[in-house]
Amino acid sequence: MAPQSMVRVGLLVSFSVFLTVTLGFGLPALLNAVMRLLGLPETSVTECIVVVYALFVLYVAMPRIPRGSVEVKGKGVLITGCDSGFGHALAKHLHRLGFTVFAGCLLKDKGGEGAKALEEFHSDRMKVLQLDVCSDGEVKAAVEFIRNNLEDSQRGLWAVVNNAGVSTFGEVEFTSVDTYKQVSEVNLWGTIRVTKAVLPLIRRAKGRVVNIASMYGRMGNMMRSPYCVSKYGVEAFSDCLRYEMKSWGVKVSVVEPGNFIVATGILTRDVVATTANKLWSEAPPDVKEDYGKAHFEHLMALMRSYCNSGQKDDAPVMDDITDAIVSKRPYTRYSPMEPHWWIRMQIMTHLPGAISDLLYF
């Protein structure tokens, strides 16, 4: 993970101090009252709990401690969704580090620009392959290609990075069931399909599975339910797989990027306009009448405002994925995001829903 900015460190430390002080004054009194009620002696155990918690949050806020790195030479990594965005950047990044990269591109056979750019490396360690994660046939062909092109197939494939994904938006009543299915087919079922196909090679190498989820795999938001549903599924799948793979020596990690709209170009004004027209034209008449055009246009204007938002540099995501692949002791979750999103995620996942609803909705 890249060294975190002083602003982020300051905000996270301030947040930890606030929680620590709150717990320091409130939790001891509460627990001591319970102890008195039970007729047990009061102790300083609550103060110890607060200190341990403070150290934990400070650890989260500080740059990561090095945990050793594996040898890169001779190791292969499959990355899905390399046509653009994170996948394209990651393919180049891991190639520079010395990995043999199997870059899966949806549009390779159609002359996609992303695939062409990777092929122009003219390197034995950059192997571009056609891969639609929704196609059983293409996934099977990709695995066979990988098996035939590994330096030593007996050593297996070191890592798979399930990055391929799509994004959409829309209120629940404006969004068709088919849209939910289409988004999950790529984001969730594509992840499952590719993982199951390469898992025998990963187990052989005692390697890594890295699944790209999102901060919206940990918390919901208005207008994003199809995307949230699919990413929550990726989180659950990753947890279950991690438990099952522990005995095989395979490490499973989830990367939960925050807002990188500008860095990836995943949401543009043209995309918003096209999606808005589709949502309105396909909405049931009673939904249009109840919500009204003004309400709908207000939400679409909000989505257009997001097109230029977020972090411009994808380095935090690249560094976290790299750590998950290279570190001898990778984390189960990585959360590259801006401080305010990190704080929001902690509040929404750790505090009662009534509090987070009051603060954010």
Image (cartoon, grey):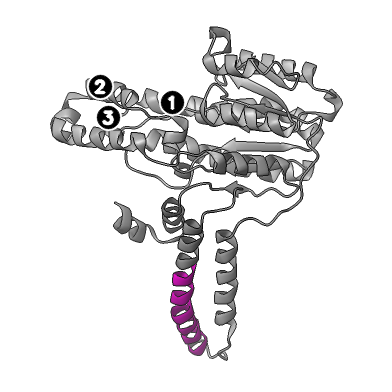
Q: Residues within 10 Å of mark 1 (few under 14, many from 20)?
A: some
CA–CA distance between discs 1 and 3?
15 Å
CA–CA distance between discs 2 and 3?
11 Å
Q: Secondary structure at mark 1?
A: helix
Q: Position of residue 41 (x, y in %)?
A: 57, 91
Q: Position of residue 64 (x, y in %)?
A: 64, 55
User: Which quarter of the figure has residue 181?
Assistant: top left
For residue 150, above or below residue 299: above
Q: Earlier in the sequence, mark 2 or mark 1?
A: 1
CA–CA distance between discs 2 and 1?
20 Å
Q: Residues within 10 Å of mark 2 (few under 14, many from 20)?
A: few
Give the residue number, with chain letter if any, for mark 1.
181
Give the residue number, with chain letter if any, for mark 3.
174
Depth order, front residue of 211/17? 17
Q: Which mark is residue 277?
A: 2
Residue occupying image coordinates x 80% and y 34%: 205
Give the residues drawn in magenta, as a range.
Answer: 16-36
**Foreground tag (2 vs 3):** 2
Depth order, front residue of 1/258? 1
Residue 206 located within the stretch drawn in magenta: no
For residue 325, above or below residue 105: below
Three-letter amino acid code of the residue under disc 1: Lys
Q: Position of residue 335 (x, y in %)?
A: 54, 48
Q: Which mark is residue 45?
A: none
Q: Residues within 10 Å of mark 3 (few under 14, many from 20)?
A: many
